[in-house]
Amino acid sequence: MKKKYTGIKLEIMAVILSLTLAVTAIMSFMVLNIQKKSLTNEMELRGLSMTRNIANNIADSILMKYELEAAKILKEAMQNKGVRYAMVAGSNGKILAHNDMTRVKSAYMPPGRLLYTTPGKNTVYETASGEKVIEFTASVVAKHKVKIGTVYVGLSYDLITNALKRTYFDIILVTVIAVLLSVLGAFLLSAAFTKPIYALAEGARIAGMGDLNHKISIKNRNELGLLADAFNSMTGDLQKAQKAEIERLALEKELEIAWKIQDSLLPKSFPDMKKYEVAAFYKPAKEIGGDYYDVIPLSAGRFGIVMADVSGKGIPAALIMTMLSGILNMEAPANPDPVTVMTKLNDGLLTKVGGGMFATVFYAVLDTGSGSVEMVSAGHHEILVYRGSAAAVESYSPKGAAIGVLKSMEFGTRMEKISLKVALGDKLLLFTDGISEARADKGGRFGMERAVQSLKKNGGKTCRVVVEGLLSDVEGFTGGQEQSDDIAVLSIGRNA
């Protein structure tokens, strides 16, 4: 099920708008309180000032009982904005002067229900019509000595209410402007913020579809720009990694093909040698290697026995091994003398291979009829022969230079040929230096002496047991750690 996502632009706008409204509400509340206190203080100062002026101006008129003069002063006071009444009452509670002369000599009555007293000790009433009035008082003192009454002036609370309404309107106007500006600012900010994010998301989607050439262009010099640069760098690295992976897969395919070719050169089965049995084993240190063994049918019950070790590992060694196999299989049947075969092999490789590549090769011709063996070695280490009659092991190491080092004439003169007889129960054991130079995890090499002891232990058994016993002894010696060189083993034994 596809996930639903909300737009980050709307989320940013909602947050900014909420903050704007919250700040505006707090500021409005504070401004209204301040404005209300200010208006109340201003109104009280105005009412007290007006009341005291009336008290000062009307004192003589009251004292002299100039009722018309007193009424005139009170009527003039009524001209001030918001004044609802103005009067003077005596100590007995009778009205001495009033802006409405019909109220003179009547008893003073509060204008309505008492609501509360202001911080300036002035009382607030609610009239019968529902209007709020603040009443101010001041003593009327004649000749600065005799108190003859009290002035009462009522100011409408609408003066404060109307001013607050104007403040409300101003606040609402400011709030609307602030909201509009915040919405506009939030839109511009979110657009500027979400555009590069969208570019990043789109770039990730395109890269996820396999297009690693796509680059994200973000001009911001902030973290988003840094993220875009990191993304572009990542896709570049992924391209390199992808290219390397393709090359690796191609190389693996090439190695697989090369291994199949090499594997096809190593015998899966051996020719029928009548009285003789054969067993072999091969394992390269890498995917492919340079060790090689073979049993080549010649003529009249004669067979060529080969064990070779090409210097190096991997594809170069495998290519040399392939060439070596081709030359041997061509020259061995045509030349009965092992020295001649090796000389031809050396000449063939010298003309085609350079760069310090060489191979050590053991080659022998076995006559299964007579049991005679003629052997030569081109720099290869000794071979082991198990004598069944004595249950002993002999070592043979004909002298000779490695293939690909010396030219034909010098190569042939250095080559030594050794002959021996193979009797019933005897076995030949050939191997490459992957056996003799196998290293233990604590150091030290397997060596030829351990190979001799292994053959002596298993020589009376089949060739397959001889090969497997040698490999088991090597694995026990190395502790099962990864082999460092190619391993090839070949055993031939006479059993009749």
Image (cartoon, rainbow, N blue to C red):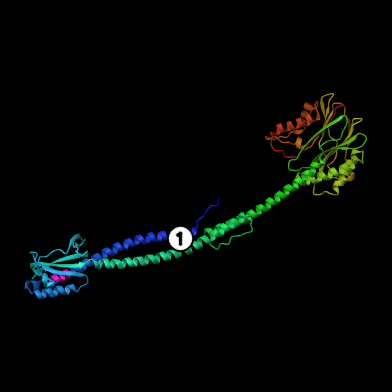
- How many labels sit on residues? 1
Q: Name the residue at 37% across, 66% down.
A: 174
Task: Left or right? Give the position of 467 relative to 20.
Answer: right
The amino acid at mark 1 is Met
- Give the image location of residue 298, x and y in percent: 90, 37
Closer to us: 306 or 33: 33
Secondary structure found at label 1: helix
Closer to us: 226 or 341: 226
- Give the image location of residue 86, x and y in percent: 15, 69
Task: Sort mark 1 into few (<14), some (14-19) or many (20+) by Cα contacts within 10 Å.
Answer: many
Task: Left or right? Give the position of 3 relative to 164.
Answer: right
Question: Which residue carries the number 1 mark?
Answer: 13
Q: Is residue 89 visible?
A: yes
Segment colored magenta: 50-55
Q: Is residue 411 visible?
A: no
Closer to us: 183 or 486: 183
Quadrant of res 471: top right
Q: Name the residue at 66% across, 52% down.
A: 242
Up/down of 313 relative to 149, above or below: above
Magenta region includes residue 344: no
Quarter of the image with the C terminus is top right
Magenta region includes residue 54: yes
Quadrant of res 436: top right
Q: Main secondary structure of the magenta part?
A: helix
Task: Left or right? Give the position of 237 relative to 433.
Answer: left
- Give the image location of residue 317, x and y in percent: 78, 45
